[in-house]
Structure formats: structure tokens, C-alpha cells
């Protein structure tokens, strides 16, 4: 398995250098994709085979392909960072590989071995390295590995053929003009994940389930949605695509415990480690909306932030719902929030010592 060899077919019509350079000046997340993609096929009787790097382009798919009907789809999000010496690195790829395996188990898809996952990133960067932006303004290449049920069969069962693919898109800074606290919409009328559901899997369906509340949030001036537990709408879970942290006046930090309905964010896990490294108390436990409301109103909670690969660490200024507003939209980003963000991006760009060996080199 470790020996799976990638066949490389170069794109004969890559984006011209000048056009790519122009795009890299102000990349828009997800709008422009690189010149190549990775494909690895799995079949029930053959296992993983046919690993290839091919030109970026449409997937030829039969209308009866299982993914289009029963939603067997999982994905990952990981970035490639260019360091000052030109080398290209990524952050904790084994953790993403493990999570893709966890998502696969839950969605009855085949588990891609960790070494094929890491190799697939190296293979893509080997041909599309020029798409990794210079390390200014927090620009990176966002990499999107994903797996789909690719069997042409309308029967309801776990697909017997699947495809793993990797595509990538350059991204600019999430925040332009400095860190600005965002407003978060509290979903009171829809839940993202229930007990024993798919909340812990990084699967498209969870995102589909979050979009109605996201639209409601947009209509109310909020950029993201916070979901509560599906059963009692009492406990805070997470945002549609980011995990949450609360900083208290006495210096300790709390984040909702992973209970099977919350996505196991790799940024979350890294932030937990960085907080503990600083000697601060970190609690992973149940947190109620009542506690957050009272804490923010009384000044007991002094900072709130969300984290994920795309936006790294995002300060939160206020929470809103159809019933209330908690906090203030013009809050300043907190000191711990800003300093954790600085430290984490510093590690990713090779400017701060990588004490935990989180970085993996993709290319010289
Ligand atoms: C991807 C994701 C996160 C963040 O995970 P990272 O590994 O930190 O990028 C958080 N919540 C949800 C629902 C996600 O899909």
C-alpha cells in the first residue's frame, strides 16, 4: 500500500505565468483552482489503486453515481505555506489523514491510508508549487482533499467504488485591514448534528444542514452561525465550520468538550496545546448559552474566538439571535486571541520555533 506509485500527466495548457501571478496578488478563496488534481480509485475487490496526477478538469460522472443520491462525501481542508527561503510546508497532515479516516468510517467509505494522503499533497505541490503564494498578508494555497462514492448504482448501500481527489485554490487573508471581531448568529431553529449522527464527520451533508441558518445569519448582519446541542438547545457546540473558545477574567480558557457531535478541529487541538504550553488552565467541558450570556454581560468572559484552518483564529464580538444580542460588535480583539493567532501563524510560516513538530515539508 505504501508503495502506491503516482502516474503524472502534466497539464499541457497550464494557466500562463503572468495570469497566475496576477491571480496570486489578491486570491479569492475557492474561485481559482490550480492546474492539476490528484485522483486515487478504490474498488471493493481491489482496494486503493490507480493513483494519478492529472490536469484539473471536470469529473465525468454517470447521473446514477451514488454520491449524487445518498451523499457519501467527506472532505478535508489543509494549507500549504511558503517559507521565507521558498520552501513549501504543510501543518499536521497526519492529523488530517486520521480525521479523513474517521469521517470515512462514519460514512461507510473506504479509509485512505495516511501515507497515501501525505504523498498526495506532495504530488500535487510537485506540479503546482508555483501556485503557493509568497508569504505576505497570510496568503496560502488551500488544499481540498475529498472522497466520494463513485459507483453507478441506485441501490441503497455503501458504494463499492470510491474516488479520492485533491484540488487546491490560492487564498488571501481572511481579514483585510487587521483583525476585526465578527458577529455570530445563534441558530435556534435548526441543529447541525444530533447524538450518534454525523457531527464528527467532515461531510458535505453537515454543511448542507447549516446553510439555512447561515442565510438567516447573513440577513441579520452575522457572518457565521453557532449551533447548540440538538436535544435541548442549551449547550454550545460550534460554528458551521469552526470551533469555539471562551477566555475568562481569571485567565483560564474553556472550549466545548468533544462529545461526538462536534468536529475534531485540528486548529482546536493545536490551540489547546498552545494554551497549555503557556501554563494557562484549559477546560474541555459542557458550556451553556446561559453561562456565555451571563459571563459576557458580567465581564467574567473577556474574550471569545473561533478557530479553523481557513480563518485560523477569529475574534468574536457579539452573538445575536431572534431573541437577543450578547456582547458588542465594536469589541476589540482580545489580547490572548491576538497572541495565539500570532504564535500559530508564526509556526505555520516558519517564523516561530515548531516545538511540537507540526510542520511537514512538501517541497524544497
Ligand atoms: C473543518 C471544520 C472545523 C475546523 O477544523 P480544522 O481542522 O481546524 O480546520 C470545525 N468545525 C467544522 C464543522 C468543520 O467542518
Image (cartoon, rainbow, N blue to C red):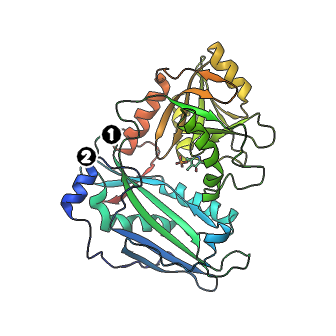
Q: Residue at x 33, y 79 (%)?
A: 9
Disc 2 to disc 1: CB gap under 8 Å = yes
**Residue holding disc 2:** 84
Q: Measuring 49% from the left and 34% from the top, which residue is drawn there?
A: 314
If you read the primary sequence from the N terminus, does the residue marked by circle 2 or circle 1 appear first? 2
Q: Position of residue 258 (x, y in %)?
A: 69, 44
Q: Residue at x 26, y 60 (%)?
A: 130
Residue at figure coordinates x 53%, y 32% from the top left: 221
Residue position marked by numbered label 1 in the rendering? 351
Please determine whether, in this image, residue 299 is positioned above or below residue 196.
above
Q: In the visual, does 87 lie left or right of 270?
A: left
Indicate the position of residue 57 as horizontal and vertical percent values: 39, 72
Q: Is residue 204 above or below residue 219?
A: below
Mark drawn on residue 224 = none
- Of 87 and 22, nearer the camera is 22
Quarter of the image where the C terminus is located: bottom left
Beta carbon at label 1 within 8 Å of ligand 1: no
Q: Secondary structure at mark 1?
A: loop
Q: Is residue 110 visible?
A: no
Amino acid at each position: 500500500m505504501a508503495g502506491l506509485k503516482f502516474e503524472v500527466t502534466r497539464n499541457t495548457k497550464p494557466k500562463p505565468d503572468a495570469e497566475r501571478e496576477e491571480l496570486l496578488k489578491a486570491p479569492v478563496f475557492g474561485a481559482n483552482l490550480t492546474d492539476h488534481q490528484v485522483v486515487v480509485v478504490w474498488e471493493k475487490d481491489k482496494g486503493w489503486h490507480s493513483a494519478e496526477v492529472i490536469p484539473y478538469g471536470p469529473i465525468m460522472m454517470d447521473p446514477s453515481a451514488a454520491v449524487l443520491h445518498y451523499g457519501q462525501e467527506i472532505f478535508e481542508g489543509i494549507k500549504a505555506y511558503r517559507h521565507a527561503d521558498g520552501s513549501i510546508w504543510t501543518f499536521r497532515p497526519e492529523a488530517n489523514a486520521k480525521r479523513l479516516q474517521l469521517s470515512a468510517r462514519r460514512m461507510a467509505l473506504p479509509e485512505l491510508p495516511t501515507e497515501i494522503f501525505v504523498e498526495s499533497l506532495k504530488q500535487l505541490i510537485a506540479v503546482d508549487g508555483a501556485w503557493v503564494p509568497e508569504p505576505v498578508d497570510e496568503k496560502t494555497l488551500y488544499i481540498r482533499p475529498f472522497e466520494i462514492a463513485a459507483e453507478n448504482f441506485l441501490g441503497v448501500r455503501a458504494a463499492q467504488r470510491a474516488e479520492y481527489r485533491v484540488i487546491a485554490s490560492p487564498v488571501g487573508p481572511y481579514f483585510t485591514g487587521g483583525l476585526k471581531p465578527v458577529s455570530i448568529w445563534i441558530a435556534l431553529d435548526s441543529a447541525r448534528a444530533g447524538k450518534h449522527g454525523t457531527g464528527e464527520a467532515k461531510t458535505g451533508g453537515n454543511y448542507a444542514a447549516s446553510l439555512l441558518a447561515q442565510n438567516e445569519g447573513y440577513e441579520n448582519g452575522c457572518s457565521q452561525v453557532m449551533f447548540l446541542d440538538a436535544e435541548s438547545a442549551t449547550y454550545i457546540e460550534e460554528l458551521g465550520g469552526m470551533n469555539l473558545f471562551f477566555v475568562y477574567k481569571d485567565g483560564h480558557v474553556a472550549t466545548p468538550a468533544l462529545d461526538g457531535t462536534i468536529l475534531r478541529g485540528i486548529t482546536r487541538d493545536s490551540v489547546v496545546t498552545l494554551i497549555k504550553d503557556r501554563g494557562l488552565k484549559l477546560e474541555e467541558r459542557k458550556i451553556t448559552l446561559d453561562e456565555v450570556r451571563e459571563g459576557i454581560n458580567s465581564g467574567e468572559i473577556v474574550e471569545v474566538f473561533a478557530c479553523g484552518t481557513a480563518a485560523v483564529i477569529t475574534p468574536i464580538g457579539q452573538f445575536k439571535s431572534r431573541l437577543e444580542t450578547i456582547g458588542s460588535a465594536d469589541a476589540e480583539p482580545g489580547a490572548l486571541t491576538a497572541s495565539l493567532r500570532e504564535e500559530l501563524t508564526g509556526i505555520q510560516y516558519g517564523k516561530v520555533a515548531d516545538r511540537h513538530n507540526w510542520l511537514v515539508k512538501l517541497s524544497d
